[in-house]
Amino acid sequence: MGERIVISPVTRIEGHAKISIYVDDEGRVESAQFHVVEFRGFEKFCEGRPFYEMPGIMARVCGICPVSHVLASSKAGDAILGVEITPAAKKARRLMNYAQVLQSHALSFFHLSSPDLLLGMDADPARRHIFGVAAEDEDFARRGIRLRQFGQRVIELLGGKRIHPSWGAPGGVLKALTEEERQEVAGWIPEAYKSMEIALERFKAILDGFEQEVRHIGNFPSLFMGTVDEDGYMEFYDGRLRIMDSEGNIVADGLKPWRYETFLAEASEEWSYMKFPYYKPMGYPAGMYRVGPLARCNVVHAIGTPLADRELREFRQRKWVVRNESFLYHWARLIEMLHCVERIEELIDDPDIVSEHVRVKADRNHEVGIGSCEAPRGTLFHHYEVDEDGLIRKANLLIATAQNNLAMNKTVEQAAKHFVNGRRLEEGMLNRVEAGIRCYDPCLSCSTHAIGQMPLVIELRGRDGELLDRLARN
């Protein structure tokens, strides 16, 4: 008699979700699904609001990556105004974005994923969290906390506060760095480089111990999409989109983000509130693609900063090899963190970063504005349509996590089929299925469960509802 295993909630992710695993009469996994069980209504309740208020409102979409929404929203506002922002404003936005990626990646790697990586997938869940990591290696945990603090401090200096900064605006930004603040940021740089060196070496040293996880947690062919500059280097703030297949062939290049609706579409499934974006020319679900750190490291010719490029060559095995293993999102995330430190160092040495010419004023000149940027988890789009008074008639947010939805579901199914025995439930098996989701660092809401002590109950029931087995985590 077939059975269903439910993991609810999935722990150590940002938001609330559950996983269903379906097994046949012999206890073999037939399929699995990743359900997003919360509903957000930002697109609808923005209707009727002035477009110039949108960056401040959009900062509230997420408490983990608010800056990404501020920047995409501000760029959409730029397009409605029809203006080109000043060089100083663009550099300030870039600085804020690099700080955002750094702090978010630090949270993902050190707080949410390092308990699995350093303590082991089968470690006691009572200690498999950031405090357990601190007990095992206090310096490593402290460096992770400090890296996140560095990114958040830059955000605070620019935006006035670390979370939900109402700093971006159509036409530029509201504040530049002062000279004193610039010097404070510079003072963080040496420690950040040392922490990244330690983190990268530690991860590469333990990677061989996760051979089964690398091979069977999200290792499959797909498309990859990311933003690149005109030379094909990694770009987080502005550029064109490139789509590559799993063998390294460029499927599409030079795609304009503001024309995203011509090549991306969204499907729906009745068992999840999150949509399922796909690449239109290949249809649904064949047009599955991945975004975020792994995708960006796959699609670029090079990263564009020396230390990160050295790491990228090793990541690619010293030639342009596409990595299809989702477990390597962790490695790609670390490479991007190093790149962010390098770019922050460059930007704070730029005289424009303390210039006060950071805002261009204009009236509404267009009815549609589309802004995009690379958020920590992948490409983010904000699409606004306004009336003659500049009030939002329609808003559409295409979130990076949603674009990974098809891949996350395939990852869950692949991990479950390899690791889960439906006749003998063990916590380590189910943690590996959860770990597949954590590779993508999905951001499902404003809440974060970094400690990893949320209650988790897995019940194995027959089709008639009879309780066959049960595991509980408190």
Image (tube, rainbow, N blue to C red):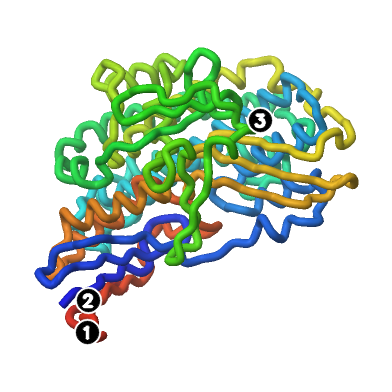
Element at badge 1? strand
Q: In which quarter of the image is residue 166?
A: top right
Residues at circles 1 and 2 in contact by the CB criterion of under 8 Å: yes
| Mark 3 vs mark 2: in front | 2
In the picture of the structure, the residue carrying the numbered disc 1 is: 467
x and y percent of residue 159 in the render?
A: 69, 40
Q: Which residue sits at x=22%, y=86%? A: 466
Give SS at disc 2: strand
Residue sitting nearer the eye, 208 or 34:
34
* Residue 460 tag number: 2
On screen, residue 251 versus residue 41, left or right, reads left
**Where is residue 409 shown, x and y percent of the image?**
34, 53
Side (left or right) of 75 relative to 329: right
Quarter-wise, where is residue 191 in the image? top left
Q: Mark 3 points at which residue?
A: 93
Callout 1, which amino acid?
Answer: Leu
